[in-house]
Image (cartoon, rainbow, N blue to C red):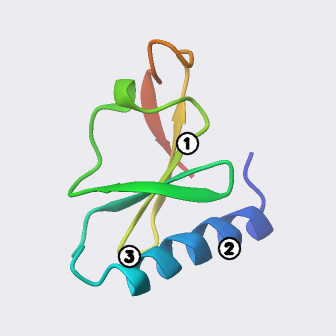
Amino acid sequence: MVTAVKKKHITEIAEQYRRNNPERLGGVVLIWQGQEYGWKNELRDPQSERPGAYAVDAKGNIWKAVGGNDYDGAERWEAV
């Protein structure tokens, strides 16, 4: 379970990324262990992310990569 404080922190990281990268319109900001590590134009391919990674869209919706393992990637995205 993700606490309200953690959600706020994740959202703040994504907002900072968007301020620093205004050319990245829409899409999702990817976050791992409290740091942004990338951006994708849409939420897709959980297998290319590690379990525990987060994705935040421009509206503030958050998903968490779950299942799987670090080598094979996550099995799915779950809304937070």
Q: Quadrant of the N terminus?
A: top right
Residue visible at 28% across and 84% down in the picture: 22
Label 2 vs label 3: CA separation? 13 Å
Q: Give the residue number, with chain letter if any, for mark 3.
A: 59
From the top left corner, tell me how far across and down residue 52 is, in percent. 61, 37
Identified by mark 3, the residue type is Lys
Report the front residue among 63 and 33.
33
Residue visible at 55% across and 42% down in the picture: 53
Where residue 4 sits, quadrant-wise, is bottom right
Q: Secondary structure at mark 1?
A: loop
From the top left corner, tell me how far across and down residue 12 is, in percent. 60, 77
Label 1 vs label 3: CA separation? 18 Å
Q: Give the residue number, with chain letter if any, for mark 1.
A: 53
Circles 2, 3 touching at the beta carbon (< 8 Å): no
Which is nearer the N-term, disc 1 or disc 3?
1
Q: Give the residue number, with chain letter if any, for mark 2.
A: 8
Give the crowd class for mark 1: few <14, some 14-19, many >=20 residues within 10 Å. many
Report the front residue among 23 and 79.
23
